[in-house]
């Protein structure tokens, strides 16, 4: 099966095999070595001298941890959103009692930093800004570096980032860009199955933690910090996924982050060019299109469910539909991790063959497809 959704992604065989090792004592010396080794290398990927913690959770768990460890009930926060997952970030903060001010941009567009600047100028009591770096629901990558220059450089606010589908796939520097907390998860560019989440935590985030009164137990970073000092997790971890993480980080850092980023950029261009070659239209402006997931407009007269179903049934290629208000309006092709040219070419060829059968007359098989 050619799994081309925005996560979970296909996991290389050698990484899957590393998960078959016998269980070990998560309070013992062998796990301590793995925990310290993986934590140190995660810091290299995040480009931070601050703290990074490994949680047995989903990416949403890490987003929740970023919120509850830095904010207090009644804090005013600005949630800058361009899609479904950006909206989720604000919902988490609101559930825990924050006063959320939403700055929403139309689906398919990116954050306008001038609008962020305007809101922060008008509302100086805002404590933190929440933003999604790469929005998989719309296939858009925000300019996080530019956002950081405004949020941190001009206004010195806390910057909490959903980097779930960007860290380890797209260029990102936690320290240089002023990010106080960045959440990500194993089933994206890390070449891992679901099960782990990673959270970077700056010194400024720790200062906010000291004042935070939001309820927290499982996600209390103070517990993770205390236990890391003795080489243990605070709670039972996903040991098998930790074995896989150790293996994956070896491969990622041996390749080099610059090469990882270029690989994603290349496969992103290949996917977008292939889609356009079929006569289809990208959902976002190509200038802000993501290199980890490509969102494509469903042509007029084509049933999205039928298209996605036939691609899977006829060609064993799995693509994703749209979410919430975009359901039936777009489909999405994921290309995170070790995606090959051949996998993308198979996907484009499958679409070329199915599209005419579901009512899209302009589709054609590309040369060699």
Image: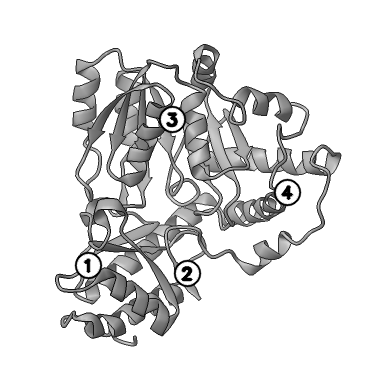
Q: Dot 1: few (<14), some (14–19), or many (≥20) neighbours within 10 Å?
A: many
Which residue in the structure is indicated by mark 2? Answer: 3
Q: Dot 4: few (<14), some (14–19), or many (≥20) neighbours within 10 Å?
A: many
The one nearer the camera, 251 or 349, is 349
C-alpha span from label 1 to label 3:
36 Å
Q: Position of residue 315 (x, y in %)?
A: 41, 82
> Which numbered disc flags the more N-terminal residue, 4 or 3?
3
> Which numbered disc flags the more N-terminal residue, 2 or 3?
2
Q: Secondary structure at mark 3?
A: loop
Image quadrant where residue 14 sits:
bottom right
Image quadrant where residue 343 sits:
bottom left
Q: Position of residue 56 (x, y in %)?
A: 63, 42
Relative to 6, does residue 280 appear above or below in the rendering?
Answer: below
Is residue 79 at all visible to an observer of this figure? yes
Label 2 or label 3, whichever lies nearer to me, is: 2
Relative to 95, does residue 24 appear above or below in the rendering?
Answer: below
Which residue in the structure is indicated by mark 4? Answer: 239
Image side of residue 286 versus residue 53, left or right = left
């Amino acid at each position: 099966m050619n799994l081309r959704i925005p996560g979970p992604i296909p996991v290389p065989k050698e990484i899957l095999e590393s998960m078959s090792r016998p269980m070990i004592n998560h309070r013992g010396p062998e796990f301590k070595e793995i925990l310290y080794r993986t934590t140190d290398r995660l810091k290299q990927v995040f480009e931070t001298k601050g703290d990074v913690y490994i949680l047995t959770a989903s990416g949403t768990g890490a987003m929740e941890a970023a919120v509850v460890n830095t904010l207090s009930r009644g804090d005013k926060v600005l949630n800058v959103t361009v899609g479904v997952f950006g909206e989720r970030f604000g919902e988490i903060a609101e559930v825990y009692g924050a006063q959320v001010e939403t700055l929403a941009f139309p689906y398919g567009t990116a954050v306008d930093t001038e609008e962020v600047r305007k809101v922060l100028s008008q509302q100086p009591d805002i404590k933190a800004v929440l933003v999604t770096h790469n929005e998989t629901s719309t296939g858009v990558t925000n300019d996080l570096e530019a956002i950081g220059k405004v949020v941190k450089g001009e206004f010195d606010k806390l910057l909490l980032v959903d980097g779930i589908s960007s860290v380890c796939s797209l260029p990102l520097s936690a320290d240089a860009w002023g990010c106080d907390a960045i959440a990500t998860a194993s089933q994206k560019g890390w070449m891992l199955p679901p099960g782990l989440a990673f959270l970077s935590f700056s010194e400024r985030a720790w200062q906010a933690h000291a004042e935070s009164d939001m309820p927290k137990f499982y996600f209390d970073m103070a517990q993770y910090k205390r236990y890391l000092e003795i080489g243990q997790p605070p709670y039972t971890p996903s040991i098998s996924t930790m074995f896989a993480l150790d293996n994956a980080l070896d491969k990622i850092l041996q390749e080099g982050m610059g090469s990882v980023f270029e690989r994603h950029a290349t496969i992103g261009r290949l996917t977008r060019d292939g889609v356009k070659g079929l006569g289809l239209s990208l959902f976002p402006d190509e200038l802000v299109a993501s290199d980890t997931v490509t969102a494509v407009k469903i042509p007029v007269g084509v049933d999205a469910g039928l298209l996605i179903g036939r691609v899977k049934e006829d060609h064993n290629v799995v693509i994703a539909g749209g979410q919430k208000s975009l359901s039936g309006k777009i489909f999405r092709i994921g290309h995170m991790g070790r995606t090959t040219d051949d996998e993308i070419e198979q996907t484009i060829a499958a679409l070329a063959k199915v599209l005419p059968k579901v009512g899209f007359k302009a589709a054609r098989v590309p040369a060699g497809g």
